[in-house]
Amino acid sequence: MASNKKYETVFSLSRLADYIGAEISGDPECQISGISTIQNAKEGEITFLSNPCYKKHLKTTKASAVIISRAESCGYQSNYLICSDPYLAYAKISQLLYPLLLPNSDEIHETAVIADNVQISSPVKIGSGVTIEENTVIGERTAINAGAFIGKGVSIGEKVTIYPNVTILDGVVIGDDCIIHSGAVIGADGLGFARSKEGWQKIAQIGKVRIGSNVEIGANTTIDRGAIGDTVIADGVKLDNLIQIAHNVKIGRNTAIAASVGIAGSTEVGENCTIAGKVGIIGHLEICADCHITAMSLVTKSIKTPGVYSSSMPALPDKVWHKVVAKIRRLAKKT
Amino acid sequence: MASNKKYETVFSLSRLADYIGAEISGDPECQISGISTIQNAKEGEITFLSNPCYKKHLKTTKASAVIISRAESCGYQSNYLICSDPYLAYAKISQLLYPLLLPNSDEIHETAVIADNVQISSPVKIGSGVTIEENTVIGERTAINAGAFIGKGVSIGEKVTIYPNVTILDGVVIGDDCIIHSGAVIGADGLGFARSKEGWQKIAQIGKVRIGSNVEIGANTTIDRGAIGDTVIADGVKLDNLIQIAHNVKIGRNTAIAASVGIAGSTEVGENCTIAGKVGIIGHLEICADCHITAMSLVTKSIKTPGVYSSSMPALPDKVWHKVVAKIRRLAKKT
Amino acid sequence: MASNKKYETVFSLSRLADYIGAEISGDPECQISGISTIQNAKEGEITFLSNPCYKKHLKTTKASAVIISRAESCGYQSNYLICSDPYLAYAKISQLLYPLLLPNSDEIHETAVIADNVQISSPVKIGSGVTIEENTVIGERTAINAGAFIGKGVSIGEKVTIYPNVTILDGVVIGDDCIIHSGAVIGADGLGFARSKEGWQKIAQIGKVRIGSNVEIGANTTIDRGAIGDTVIADGVKLDNLIQIAHNVKIGRNTAIAASVGIAGSTEVGENCTIAGKVGIIGHLEICADCHITAMSLVTKSIKTPGVYSSSMPALPDKVWHKVVAKIRRLAKKT
């Protein structure tokens, strides 16, 4: 929701340099009010050069300043900030210029339905049509936006942004500085059933979901509560959209997961992993820290060695691929 | 929501023939009030013969008329409409008999929460529990159904149907004649982070989502706003359910995408493509116009030649497949 | 939402034995108020031994009683219940100790918007911000939780639990004892279009969704209405999260489907199938009863013989996998 400039923020180049610890070249009083790409930047905007492919645009960019590495800056004549990681510097400056707005005063909409014994810190925002059920605790500067549902006995920390139409079910625990995007469902029952002659018998799902601090959860992502014991998302984890986190999964610190990934029950993913889009990980596995799984791969065994893992098959022209499939099938017939 | 006949619409066969430009055989005054399959049609209903497999039912169908090609109609004695593409004719007649109901008069529910400076044309429907935030513009004959959230600075065209519990975030632009199904989230932040020693630094997502006219977006589909610059869905695009469109993706005119597809950041898909279910397309690619990608394929490189592309592996009995996997793995050991 | 003990339920071991038909060893008056894992159980809790890997914890568990098979119980000295299927017994006892709370008295929130001619049995719960449109029928002891939308002409049976922010569209039929989790969308239009020179022509989706009894539907799962005729989910079906069920699909009795599966239009899945996570099944197929499809497999042909089917490729270290892919591609060039 950072799409529009919420209030006018203008910074001098020297202020930005201080903020990211960069060396300035050019006019330190140059005024910056926005960020854009190197091709589209206008006067008053800063841009960055991270991917060398775009270096050709340096000469023609209309940006008032460029974030750049020392090596790439060689020979460049305009205003710039030199830093070792221009992409990271861009991220930090984007936060300064387009801050996530947190509540500075109480804003509780009259249509919100809040149970009597809810404990809400101040300042806080509770949007229109929000429901908050009993025994829930909400930290200061947290915003619960329109149409969100917060169940019983939930604990939400400080400076958390919950976007419209999120569902947080009973007993979920969320740390500080989290962002939960629209349509996410946290704490639904996992798929827990025992087979019987008369069909599936439901297993009551009595665990919780515990989410750390600095966690971001994408739109329409689902995180199921534990069957017994909890589903745990550690500090700094970033989850994209439409991800399924099954019951009793544990995700380690600072692991980032792209869209449409599914992680089955009781699997534990270590710290600092990156999991590309559409990956599947079956249940009851342990994935060690510092693994990268490539897009649409299926992990069927625990991984004990950090590294890159893959089973994804790149698309080919259909006629070629048909031959491949035919050959592969013939393999099974050979001894 | 077209499930129930909203009002009684009855057309003579001659009226239907005029509407689709078909030649009549039989009684032009035959009255038609509904559509059904060739096996299940009752009196007063029209059916169609598109797939020759169903020709055997022609003799026994109770339909009052049949939409049929000239070739297939040979020898058939009842009422029929001859046209070159019976399936397309069926589509058009279905729209006539079961029209999507658009507002004809203002219907703004008392529980809707609408900011002061929202610009709403007339007639319009705003359902119960809808929230519309400031600086938003809504065109005439548009329906925003119950529980939908429309953020700040959003622009929605004419004759748009937004189903219940949709979320449209700040700054999203939607053209005319669009349909957005329940649970869709348009304009959430993309997964934009830069790595730092202290964990992931969020990159403010400051672009918008721009959606053309005649676009349909399926239930629980997510379309992220651009990081810098916009995510763009062109006119006539049809998206099914549970699709992920990442930041800065561009989808060309009249491209249709089936359910559970994921398209990663900054990829551009051309016009008139058809993408089958569960396909993944990685980021920063260009897919040219007129491509078809088969179900569950993974596109890892740009495609420059129109055609069919695939990497999908059809399921086999597990024992056979196990042998295939073992043989495939052994391949890697050979020189 | 069964996460918190809603009211204090304590049972004697003899009562539990009667309930599941087990033989008691030890103190029949031992009082049990909860369930936990064998490692984490505390006094007053019962646990179960289903997976032999956990047998080593039998000696040290603090559980007041253990559900166990006769074979495994040999030599165990504490309180236990002997039964042939400890996992099933655990499921049944979990339902007793953590019952799903159904309405015992009318609880209709003042902010709910209910059309005049809705037929609601008593007792019933209608939560805050719920919308129920005309001609809908809701059975007794059913709970429609906050923010849910129920369209026109919907029929919902008895003892159904609809979690917050669910969307049930016009004409959907739901049996008794169902559970529908948050964010699920039942009855949206399927992807039905006919190609024309001017782009895609929408085919009115005029069928319904008919859901049997004892069905559970996961969070953010989507079930589309039929194009003509209905989409059908039979009794006892269990669907996990983020599943796509396309128009006119039929799912047979007691079939269980894990998260992120997609089933394309008009496919029929038989009874007692189990479909693992991320499977895709293309349209117009018939899958016979008693099939198991492994995770991330793609079913492209009808299956007529019960059994296990697979096309899933387990991930390998990326360097090894690259060699595999290269070799596979070379296969296509050989004659």
Image: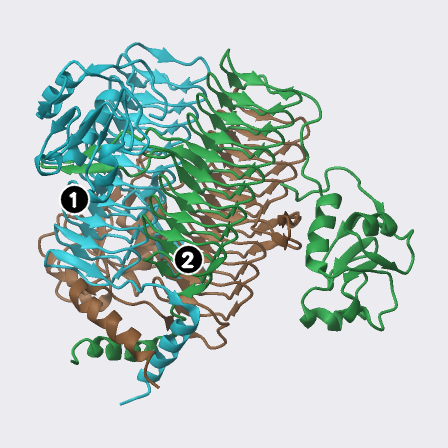
Chain colours: A green, B brown, C cyan
Residue C256, quarter of picture: top left
Which quadrant would the C terminus of chain B be assigned to in this image? Answer: bottom left
Q: Where is residue B169 in the image (x, y as percent from the top left)?
A: 58, 40
Q: Is residue B145 visible?
A: no
In-front residue for pair A325/C85: C85
Residue C228 in the figure: left or right of residue B151: left
Q: Residue C252 carries which label?
A: 1
Residue C152, quarter of picture: top left
Residue C329, quarter of picture: bottom left
The numbered mark 1 sits on a residue in which chain? C
In-front residue for pair A166/B57: A166
Q: Which of marks 1 and 2 is in front?
A: 1
Q: Position of residue A334 (x, y in %)?
A: 17, 81
Residue A163 in the figure: left or right of residue A46: left
Q: Can residue C16 be seen in this view?
A: yes
The residue singled out by tag 2 in the image is: B257
Q: Where is residue A137 in the image (x, y as percent from the top left)?
A: 53, 21
Q: Position of residue A273 (x, y in %)?
A: 49, 54
**In the displayed structure, would residue C20 be above or below residue A34?**
above
Q: State the residue at coordinates (83%, 49%).
A: A18
Type of amino acid at the residue the image marks with label 2 = Ile
Are labels 1 and 2 assigned to the same chain? no
Type of amino acid at the residue the image marks with label 1 = Gly
Which quadrant would the N terminus of chain B be assigned to in this image? Answer: top left
Secondary structure under badge 2?
Answer: strand
In-front residue for pair B53/B271: B271
In-front residue for pair B178/C32: C32
